[in-house]
Image: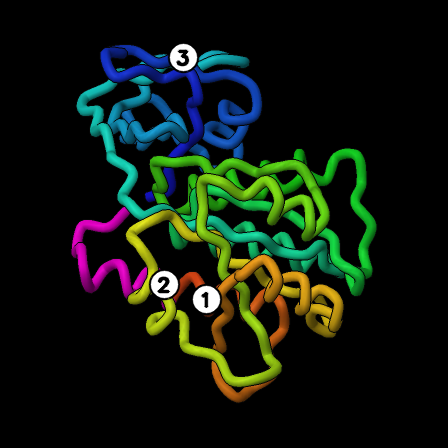
Amino acid sequence: MPSFYTPDMKINDDIVSISGTEHHHICHVFRRKEGDKIILSNGKGLLAEGIIRNVKKKELTVSINKITAMQISQPQIAVAFPLLKNKHDNMIIEKLTELGVKDFFPITTERTIRKSSINAVEKFQKVAIAAMKQCDNAFLPQIHEVQSLNELIEKMEEFVPIAALEIGKHKTINELVTNLEVRSICIIIGPEGGFDKGEIEYLQNKQVATFTLGNHILRAETAAIASVAQLVGYFLRNNSEYY
């Protein structure tokens, strides 16, 4: 059962009022009515089970039966990805939100084809909200402003950056994280055509660890999904409750 986004919901709420876009989705897209069970997420760790009690033209109320406060598991996963043509970067946001990525860093590189638009982050946020609701994720990931690869590395403090590279011999992501301290990780994915020579040298000079995804050339969105899936699997082996 998909959840619905209620960002103002708090742990002690008995009744939640819903209006706007989510009211439309509940009543007109999913055709829920009074007496139907419903799941709510505030995107900040709370998942609630409730029953629709009162439906009006522009607002409905939900009686809360149970609220569960989920805890973010450590280490966290972030992904830095290039802006991609044909909205393939939307796929990165969608699928990796389902997998539990907590931060997204859109970046531009020398071979980035698509230019950043004024509302790029807003569009990514809408994709993340839809994906969070679809998989009953309790946490809405943060979408950071578009920046260059250099800006990303220079400002990176909370996460240990690691980069996927196709050229040369590299460890697998599992082998790589085994040797890292238990810290949150930011996976950096290159653009169509990969990082150029100068960017690779820059990553090496900044001592950014690199890993391989195998012997096939992967699209950027495939590389992002494969990287996170492998990393989530690694963390699940160490903690079956990893969320």
Q: Residue furthest bottom?
A: 215
The residue where tag 2 is placed is: 231
Label 1 neighbourhood size at 10 Å, few (<14), some (14-19), many (20+)? many
Task: Locate residue 39 relative to residue 199 in the image: left or right.
Answer: left
Kind of residue at badge 1: Ser
The residue where tag 1 is placed is: 227
Residue 173 among those drawn in magenta: no
Q: Residue furthest front?
A: 205
Quick check: 20 above or below 113?
Answer: above
Write the start and end of the magenta stretch as one range.
230-243
The residue where tag 3 is placed is: 17
Q: Secondary structure at mark 3?
A: strand
Residue visible at 69% across and 72% down in the picture: 194
CA gap, disc 2 to disc 1? 6 Å
User: Mark 2 near mark 1, Cβ–Cβ under 8 Å?
Assistant: yes
Kind of residue at badge 3: Ser
